[in-house]
Amino acid sequence: MFAESPHRASRGDGAEDFSFFAEKVPGLYIALAGRSPLIRADQAPGHRTPESAIDDSGLGVGGRAITAMALHYMTTSAAAVSATP
């Protein structure tokens, strides 16, 4: 879709409580960004500011990626095979 996407983003705070959950159960943190590909990262306004604008053109790609990961996990995980109450 975009020449540089998907790509590995630099580490940041993200969900600061995620690491606490991941200490107890296996976890994966994935971020779906909403910056327009027409705006350079260093020119983009910050989150939660009046100037920020979300470009939702990447939601389809992100949704398909998250769905594919969930389906893969459900079909290959031992937890999915032995999911009995």
Image (tube, helix red, strand yellow):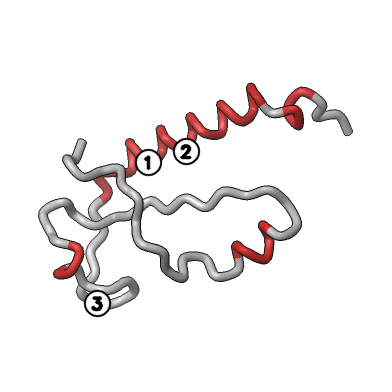
User: Where is residue 65 drawn, in percent x and y?
Assistant: 42, 35
Residue 74, relative to residue 59: is it above or below?
above
Tags 2 and 1 in contact by the CB under 8 Å rule? Answer: yes
Q: Is residue 54 above or below residue 81?
A: below
x, y percent for residue 28: 56, 48
* Circle 3 crowding by C-alpha within 10 Å: few under 14, some 14–19, many from 20: few
> What secondary structure is marked by label 2?
helix
Task: Residue under label 2, please give it.
Answer: 66
**Left or right for 48, reference 81:** left
Q: Secondary structure at mark 1?
A: helix
Query: What label does residue 50 carry, if any?
Result: 3
Q: Amino acid at mark 2?
A: Ile
| Mark 2 vs 3, N-terminal side | 3
Nearest the camera: 63 or 9? 9
Q: Which mark is residue 62?
A: 1
SS for dot 3: loop
Q: Residue 47: where, in percent of width, then height?
A: 32, 71
> Residue at position x 34%, y 74% from top?
48
User: Which residue type carries mark 3?
Assistant: Pro
The picture quadrant where one finds residue 59 is top left
